[in-house]
Amino acid sequence: MFVDDACYQIEKYERNVRQIGVVPYIPRFSQLAARMEQYINGSRDLVDQAYTKIVTIMFVILEKIAQVEPKYVDIVLLENYAAFQHSLYDLANVVPTLAKYYHQASEAYEQACSRL
């Protein structure tokens, strides 16, 4: 239920195209992940499933947001994928599922850089 609510909040996020910067759900996710890791208590699979569901939605919505203003697509992607990497660096070093998404964000960041 909580994960579904979090995904819903991300999906309904609307951004003013003239605002360039990190979307609010990127830094909030790292805070959520840090808390989840504190209280995991043997539920690794369940937590990893939650990470997968939330981050997948985050990245899909980020790509949609970036496409709204073609002039700024790569800038929006650069800023947000860099923020994702920065905020999850420590956790990605100890949580394999988060490491997977950290590397995915890194690849997307590099692709956006190559288009500038």
Image (cartoon, rainbow, N blue to C red):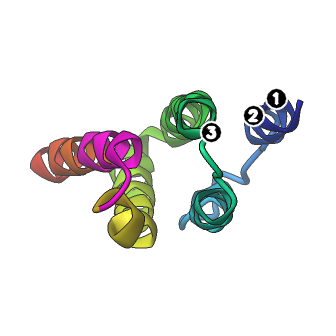
Task: Name the one closer to the observer, 74 or 88.
Answer: 88
For the residues labelled 2 and 1, say whether their Cβ atoms are less than 8 Å apart: yes
101 magenta-colored:
yes
* CA separation in Å, label 3 and label 2: 20 Å
Residue 76 spot, x, y in % from top left: 44, 54
Residue 70 pos. (x, y %): 43, 38
Q: Is residue 82 left or right of residue 64?
A: left
The answer to whether residue 79 is left or right of residue 35 is left
Looking at the image, is mark 1 or mark 3 earlier in the sequence? 1
Tell me where the magenta segment starts and ends, as one range.
Answer: 94-104
Tag 3 residue = 43
Mark 1 and mark 3: Cα distance apart in space? 18 Å
Q: What residue is shown with label 1?
A: 4
Give the residue drawn at x 28%, y 62%: 93
Q: Which secondary structure, mark 1? A: helix
Q: Is residue 67 above or below residue 84?
A: above
Q: Left or right: where does residue 106 sit relative to residue 90?
A: left
Amino acid found under the numbered disc labelled 2:
Cys
Measured along the vertical axis of the image, is residue 7 above or below residue 109? above
What whole-number distance in Å separates the C-alpha atoms at marks 2 and 1?
Answer: 5 Å
Q: Residues within 10 Å of mark 1 (few under 14, many from 20)?
A: few
Residue at x 32%, y 50% (from the top left corner): 102
Is 62 positioned to the left or the right of 97 in the image? right
Check if mark 3's residue and mark 2's residue have beta carbons within 8 Å: no
Instruction: Report the front residue among 90 and 66.
Output: 90
Q: Quadrant of residue 47?
A: top right
Give the residue at mark 2: 7
